[in-house]
Amino acid sequence: MTGMLRVWASFVVTIAMLAMPMRAAAQPRPPDVDALLARLDDLYRSTSSIARIEIQVTSARSTRSLRLKAWTRGEDESLIVIEAPPREEGTATLRVGANLWNYLPRISRTIRVPPSMMLGSWMGTDFTNDDLVKESSLRKDFEARIDRRSDTPPGWWVRLDVKPGVVGRWARIDTLVSDDLLPIEERHFDRKGRLARTMVFDDIRMLGGRRLPAHLTLTPADTEGQRTEMRYLDAQFDVPIPDDTFSLSRLERSK
Amino acid sequence: MPGFMMSRIAWRNLWRNRRRTGLALTAIGLSVALVLIYDGMLRWESDWLLATTTGPMLGHAQVHAPEWRRTRAMDQTLREVPRLVDALRRDPEIASATPRVYAPALAALGQEGFAVLVLGVDLAEESRPTRLLAGNTTRLTGRRVLMGRLLAAQMGVQPGAVIALVGQGLDGSLANDLFTVAALIETPVDLVNRQTIVMPLDEAQSLFVMSDEAHEIVIYARDPARAAALAARLNGRPDLGRAEVLDWQALAPAMVDLIRLVEVAWVFVLVLVLIAAASGVANTMLMATFERTHEFGMLLALGTAPSHIVRMIVLESLALGVIGALLGTALGGALVAWAHHTGIDYAALTGGGPSQLSVFGMNWSLRIYPRLALIDIARVVIAVMVTSIVASAWPAARAARLQPARALRD
């Protein structure tokens, strides 16, 4: 009886070993993880960018839209100015390094966001202030590796695990990247390993001479009926941006 | 032997050795007085603990939207709050009901932002004695707010300063406006002093686009002891809809434990003191029976039933206990009454130091006004009586078992 089992087992193992190279051959080779992350980081930003974006926030109670214009330069500087609705027109956020300032035209005040408010919502969306500041530090704070193959949709799951000693909100980020190296989905796991939110990328189109997903949907895991959608209306990349764009004096003239 | 006669004999026996009986009475009396003083302090402490816990912030019960306690999300509000508050205020068991708005916000004097909590309240209601803003006389009209003193110190805000407040409206919009700090406040609640900006309810509702909504209605019961029953009854009221009503014990379990601890603390002291009283009574009675061995032998020889002797000894010891307890009650009661009138400065007793302590996020006063309830006195008097009877068991048993012939020779 055990003899029979052993024969069976070796038979199965042999078949499996024969099958493996065939499967691998049918698949594309996994991408280089560092190059992939660099590409993802660069996708919406490049060396500099100017984009117009529409944001729609849906909650159980209400739906709200914002239209904004965003300038970025390098990894550390960005300026976001709200263009609509009229009630919030001219409200702006300036980021330089880890610092974040909001300009509020209604009361003509510029206020720096304190560290304790970094996890607070940015302008009532599901994005946090921290998302704006931390957007460029993925490669620095996380250990990345190709995790597994995805068949539908075809692509690779890239797993990012936070490096020991890094203080932050996420313990792990799983990113699904298509075979043409565009993001499809991102899952953020909190420090207790629970899925906290999902970001889905779709509607791939040409924007500023690049192919990229123009529509992003961020869905928090814990609040039913809640999501924030972001749609790129237009974008320019690698255009010259004046030095004083990312300054407090410019912030207060943002209208 | 008729009872009254036995009592008279017992009474006379008690005073055969005046000095010994006097000493025993002093010991029992002082013990009882001590217990009463301690009880008085405990009773004040638990009353005061309850008042301090529920008075300023917690109330005896609270009404919330069902998810509010878990998420503390801005949009978990009670609707039609004026109607709810009116309905609650008409309830015969409710002394008062007051709505509150809690909104996280960013406050700034200059460019530096500080995380704060905006508390929207019914100012007149919250300014009543023992409430959050007790003693407050500042009226808030036209974008004027109160600010916690510690928060003001941190932000460098003086009364009269204009601050910006930025938060999120319930419709998702950006709530932002300028407010004048009318006065700084110091409340019994640490969080309020450290992090809070208080504004009138309607001002908070309009800043955060809340129409007739609020996050909480705080209820003060006519009888705080019935808070749990009141909350349970309100939970079933159809006009409160899906709202959740919880009594303060469910809201602050840590405080309940603390109050219970204070309430049972009297048992330990009572037991300690009663052990002292029991040994006093037992000692006195044992001495008394030893020196009366000859007399008991005579009584037994004359045909007195041993049970009579036992009864006499028990009566003597009971009389000792009761007189001692009454003397102690008089002394302890007088001391507590006096202390209740003048108050005791605990801080001075313990050698200076602060006149307030901050524990559990509450500021505790160190001036105490002990008081006694009838139950405290009844408890200790009965306990001393029982102790006296128990303590007389040994001497009584010894006397009952005497052999008349041998006892007479002693």
Image (tube, grey):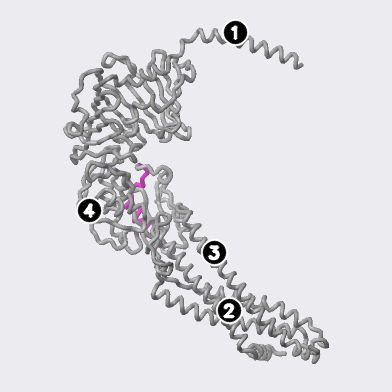
Contact, mark 1 vs mark 3 (Cβ under 8 Å): no
Q: Amino acid at mark 2?
A: Ile
Q: Where residue B158 is drawn, which disc sits there?
A: 4
- Identify whether B78 is placed above or below B227: above
| Between B23 and B100, the one nearer to me in the picture | B23
Q: Secondary structure at mark 3?
A: helix
Q: Where residue A18 is drawn, which disc sits there?
A: 1
Q: Amino acid at mark 4?
A: Gln
- Identify whether A230 is placed above or below B124: above
The x and y percentages for residue A172 are 45, 28
Mark 2 to mark 4 CA distance (whole Å):
60 Å
Side of A234 relative to B51 (left or right): left
Which residue has dot 2 on it? B28
Callouts 4 and 3 on one subunit: yes
- In this rendering, the label closer to the viewer, 2 or 1: 2
**Residue B92 in magenta?**
yes
Q: Amino acid at mark 3?
A: Val
Q: What is the magenta range?
A: B75-93
| Quadrant in which the C terminus of chain A is drawn | top left
Mark 2 to mark 1 CA distance (whole Å):
96 Å
Callouts 1 and 4 on one subunit: no
Specify which label sits upstream in the sequence, 3 or 2: 2
Contact, mark 1 vs mark 4 (Cβ under 8 Å): no
Q: Chain of mark 3?
A: B
Which residue has dot 3 on it? B264
Q: Secondary structure at mark 4?
A: loop
